[in-house]
Structures are given as structure tokens and as C-alpha cells.
Amino acid sequence: MTRNTKTGQVLEFMVLPSLDLGGYRYETQVNIGHRPGGGKHYVDVVAAKDEAMILISLKWQQVSGTAEQKVPFEVICL
């Protein structure tokens, strides 16, 4: 049985219109470098407005699991 990994798109579809309304430019699924283990690290959205650039990592937890591990690991990667 494969996992449904598209549920995070629901959250992305809510965030992107908000960025549009706020006047932000954005790119999705941007490679920002490497994880501590050496693999590529992608953030869900890089938003920009004026001189500011903001990295946005979206996490969707639909089943029981390890949210306590996902968030700290994402912070470490960033």
C-alpha cells in the first residue's frame, strides 16, 4: 500500500492565494541547498516582497505519527 503524499497540496492551495492577495511573488518547490545527510533540501514556497525573502515549509499531519520529529528536522535543515 502506498502513502498518499498529495494531501499537503490542500494546504499549499490555501497558502498561495493568500500570498497573491498580499502582493507577494513566489516560487514553489525550490531547492535551497543540502540536508545534513547530503541530500537536496526543498522548501514548499519561497515568497518575496520588496527586499524580503521568506522560506515557507508546509507540513500536513493527517494521520498519527511523528510531527514531533518532522518539525525539528525541518528547522535543522533550514
Image (spheres, rainbow, N blue to C red):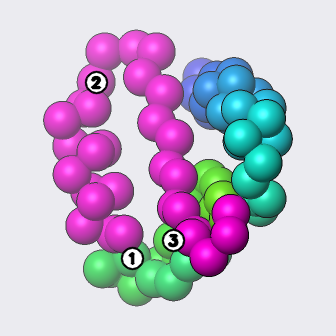
Q: Mark 1 or 2, which is nearer the eye?
A: 1
Q: What mark, if any, has residue 65 been given in the picture?
A: 2
Q: Are marks 1 and 3 in contact (CB under 8 Å)?
A: yes
Q: Position of residue 8 (x, y in %)?
A: 61, 30
Gap in angstroms between the C-alphas marked 3 and 2: 22 Å
Describe the element under mark 3 as helix, strand or loop: strand
Q: Is residue 62 above or below residue 78?
A: above
Q: Which residue is mark 3?
A: 41
- Dot 2 alpha-carbon crowd within 10 angstroms: few under 14, some 14 to 19, many 20 or more: few
| Residue 27 is covered by the magenta coloring | no
Gap in angstroms between the C-alphas marked 1 and 2: 22 Å
Q: Could you tell me which residue is drawn at 48 percent across and 27 percent down?
A: 60
- Dot 3 alpha-carbon crowd within 10 angstroms: few under 14, some 14 to 19, many 20 or more: some
Q: Earlier in the sequence, mark 1 or mark 3?
A: 1
Mark 3 residue type: His
Quadrant for the N terminus in the image: top right
Q: Are marks 1 and 2 in contact (CB under 8 Å)?
A: no
Q: What mark, if any, has residue 35 been given in the picture?
A: 1
Which range is magenta?
A: 49-78
- Dot 1 alpha-carbon crowd within 10 angstroms: few under 14, some 14 to 19, many 20 or more: some
Q: Position of residue 28 (x, y in %)?
A: 74, 56
Q: Mark 3 or 2, which is nearer the eye?
A: 3
Describe the element under mark 1 as helix, strand or loop: loop
Toward which corner of the image does residue 25 lie, by quadrant?
bottom right
Please tell me which residue lies in front, 23 or 38.
23
Describe the element under mark 2 as helix, strand or loop: loop
